[in-house]
Amino acid sequence: MKRFVLFNTTALVSLVVLLATASCGPQEKAFDVALDQLEKAYDTYKEVSIDHRRFKHQEVIHLVTERKGDFQVEAIGKSVEGKDIYQMTWGNGPSKVMLWSQMHGNESTATMALFDLFNFLEGENDGLEAIREKLKEKLTLRFIPMVNPDGMDEWIRRNALDIDLNRDAIKLASPEAVILKNARDTFSPEFGFNLHDQQIYYTAGETPTPASISVLAPAYNYATEVNEVRQKAMQVIVGMNRVMQELAPGHVGKYDDAFEPRAFGDNFQKWGTSTILIESGGYPNDPEKQEIRKMNFIIMLHALIEIADKNYTQYTLNEYYSIPDNATRLMDLILRNLTMEKEGHVYDIDLGIRRREADAHGSYFVNGAVDDMGDLSIFYGFEELDVSGMEIVEGKVFETPFTSVGEISQENALDLLKEGYLSIQVKEAADRELHHLPLLVLISGNSIPNGIRLGGNPNFFLAQNGKLKYAIVNGYLIDLERPLTKKLMQRVQ
């Protein structure tokens, strides 16, 4: 069984701040920071009150409004539902940089990283003062950390008018779009960072490696031409990619640069702001995107340092174009060489499963579904298992109903699985609560959904020589010969 592991980055570079001469002007020193210093900044200033993606506006707005030191914070308008939208200004340098996040309400990874960055900019007496002093002297930073507060509260892409803000840069039908456009026009930034999340199933080219970070210097016309404005964005991205290749080798993809005339990134580029798109994708064993949050912090801080000293000018466009394009080649789980039988036909397939989140009880649960089946040799799984020689065994429902889910422990659940039970029953519908058990919880009398078909919900056992070896529960793979991990499964219902 193949599993990805996290990279150990602590030994990649030495703990030093490198000073080297570059083409930043006569007698001026370039300021290049080693990865260890960026990691130290993150570890020191990570906002510990947030450790999950689905936070509400009211839970985090104090991280914007209650800043200290040199931050200037002001409300610049209201959302459709009347929530204040804030901009934050820091630094007094000649180069203006604007960063905005969560114009799509359910894309919060970069917002978390911005909170970490705010903490860093307020820091002191930590051995990192030279970085802050450089940024303050060279840059004026402006942040709009939550452009779509209504969408974030509902955990939806669009705003309360059901408009995609990133398709409203021209018509400006939404108040949030007007606010963002006015913020850009009044500030006239030289650089812009457009911060988003993408689906977790992108890979960096035709490889099994997730595109944890995807980048793009958006086009400003249909011909996707490169002028000086777009070229600078491309060069900044090259520097970000170099850092990512130390931090998480191979985990960077390049987003499609087809011109979208309604999008803010494309229009910022058209209006003269060198715009860098950062899309946060997937990473192994990182459902809450905390590792990718760290990546965002590090590449943004590194990019700001390179902008401050114009180090990005040393990079060639060939390096930008060499970043592999995104491909959609990942699934959560792939079972290789699964033997099926139907109407007398015995055949082998690969079974690909993807999981989707659905809202419930003020939170969410996860549903697994068969995304594709057949020859999946060009696809890869975050988790894969070769099931050659194994047979499918249907699961049973435990006969005696339980009063509530709370009566079952993880250990009890594993024992039931080993006995061939995939599901328990509860007596009341109200007790069908969200849980982390590796079992289906049914209201009394319901049957197990067993969908080994396109779009079906996969729930079955795999046996070898008559012995149960694995359980597939709601699209999750469970090894019956290993102890359960604390959070084997995300919320299920």
Image (spheres, helix red, strand yellow):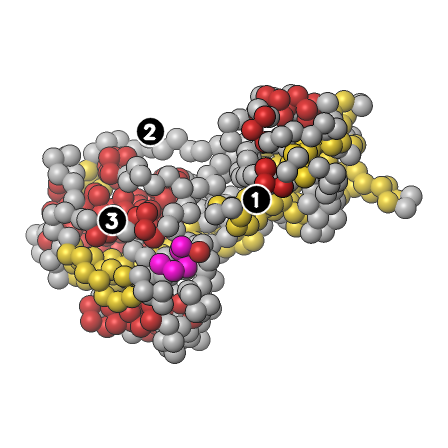
Task: Determine the image quadrant of residue 475.
Answer: top right
Q: Name the residue under label 3.
A: 62
Segment colored magenta: 149-153
Residue 38 is left or right of residue 171, and the answer is left
As helix, strand or loop, the secondary structure at mark 1 comes to strand
Q: Which residue is drawn at 73% across and 41% down?
A: 446
Task: Determine the image quadrant of residue 381.
Answer: top right
Residue 196 is left or right of residue 462, and the answer is left
Q: Where is residue 45 in the image (x, y as percent from the top left)?
A: 24, 38
Q: Mark 1 points at which residue?
A: 366
For the residue carrying disc 1, how many other residues have a C-alpha within 10 Å: few (<14), some (14-19), or many (20+)? some
For the residue carrying disc 3, how many other residues have a C-alpha within 10 Å: few (<14), some (14-19), or many (20+)? few
Magenta stretch, main secondary structure class: helix
Q: Where is residue 259 in the image (x, y as percent from the top left)?
A: 44, 71
Residue 347 is left or right of residue 167, and the answer is right
Q: Is residue 246 above or below residue 469?
A: below
Q: Name the residue under label 2.
A: 11
Q: Where is residue 118 in the image (x, y as percent from the top left)?
A: 22, 47
- Residue 61 numbered mark, or none: none
For the residue carrying disc 2, how many other residues have a C-alpha within 10 Å: few (<14), some (14-19), or many (20+)? few
Camera-near label (1 vs 3) is 3
Which comes sooner in the sequence, label 3 or label 2? 2
Which comes sooner in the sequence, label 2 or label 1? 2
